Amino acid sequence: MTEWDVAIIGGGPAGLSAAYESASRGARTLVLEKATHPRYKTCGGGLIGHSIAAVQDRIAIPSDDRIERAEFTHDGRSPFTRVSRHRPLLTMVRRPEFDDALRQAAEEAGAVVRQATAAKAVEQGGGEVRIRLADGEEITAAAAIGADGSSGITARQVGVEYGQVDLGLEVELPIDAARQEQWRGRLLIDWGPLPGSYAWVFPKGDLLTVGVIAARGEGERTKAYLRAFVERLGLQGIEPVHDSGHLTRCRTPGSPLRKGNVLVAGDAAGLLEPWTREGISFATRSGALAGAAAADGDLLRYERDVNATLVPTMRAGARLLAAFSRRPALFHTILRTPPGWRMFERFCRGETSFEGTVERFPVRQALRLLG
């Protein structure tokens, strides 16, 4: 087939969520993925409650660990630990297995997933979308969904603008049985020395994911932060299984989500939470919204849904990032208090949203004081 109801470019969480939703509604759905699953993806791999809720009805989540204990430091100092006594904070996954489970679910719903298939150009006209592949083949569809990342062809087609760009660096370190026991069920977050930066350690069975993120333009200092963080943990000298970096791009307010019959979702739309840079929940939710709108032939609904459900959280996250960048030590102190810990705990579990949190009187007053 070369003619489809919905064609999706990109086979990550956003694209495969779109495919599952579209195919489940009876639309002839095609996914074009340039790599072959399972494939490595730079990602912390921590699923918050919103991510779990978005996918738990379609896949058995391939969990490597469930986090119940969180340790926090401020540039290596003032450590404290909190324990979640009722439900885990995060579920840890390795992206190759997680994404491949989403692929299988999309195919079982009726979508066709073409792997090792690169899309090179997208054009519109005559009420349809034409996608030209690397081998010269042309695919046509009534609607297309771009889930090919912030540097992909669909973001350029739609004209997405990014107001916040950050550099994330990450290593996957193999660990022995003693370290596995040491880190099981535990994460570490360090508020870093660069404005808006932080580092993390996430356990995944026989691997530790160790990473840092900071604003783009601070590349050398971000690399130095990662090196110092690894040494501080006593993990230097371990040869990484993966050593990678990536840019996260967050859309400017009002940036387009659609152009004609092409929608963008997930990273391609710049949809992520600006403070934590958490993106999986935004990918799965925006992908599902895009797939439903495209299958139903109501593309305007996608814009309304994203603006109603995801954009308020992004606005709140941007306010938190601005305040955190100015006073990270104060944030560290607040998180140490019972109300601060409850806020973090409820966010991780998906029991509250950032927009609800920042509108609470004490938080609103604190943000006002921080400017």
Image: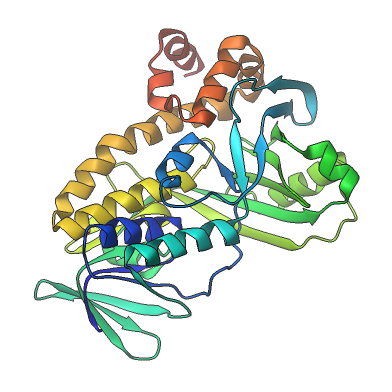
Position of 35 with respect to 137 (left or right) is: right
The quadrant where residue 231 appears: top right
Position above or below: 298 against 77: below
Position above or below: 369 against 125: above
Q: Which of 219 and 123 is in front in this view?
A: 123
Q: Nearer the viewer, residue 255 or 347?
A: 347
**Residue 80 visible in the displayed image:** yes
Position of 355 with respect to 166 (left or right) is: left
Position above or below: 54 against 3: above
Which quarter of the image is occupied by the N terminus?
bottom left
Q: Residue at x 34, y 58 (%)?
A: 20
Residue 278 in the image, given as x and y percentages of width and height? 51, 42
Q: How many labels does the image show?
A: 0
**Residue 228 visible in the displayed image:** no
Q: Which residue is drawn at 23% across and 56% down?
A: 258
Residue 322 in the image, given as x and y percentages of width and height? 50, 29
Which coloring applies here? rainbow
Position of 46 with respect to 172 (left or right) is: left
**Furthest-bottom residue in this view:** 136
**Furthest-left residue in this view:** 126
Q: Residue at x 34, y 53 (%)?
A: 287
Position of 313 with respect to 98 (left or right) is: left
Residue 19 in the image, given as x and y percentages of width and height? 33, 62
Residue 135 in the image, given as x and y percentages of width and height? 39, 91
Q: Which residue is drawn at 14% across and 54% down?
A: 298
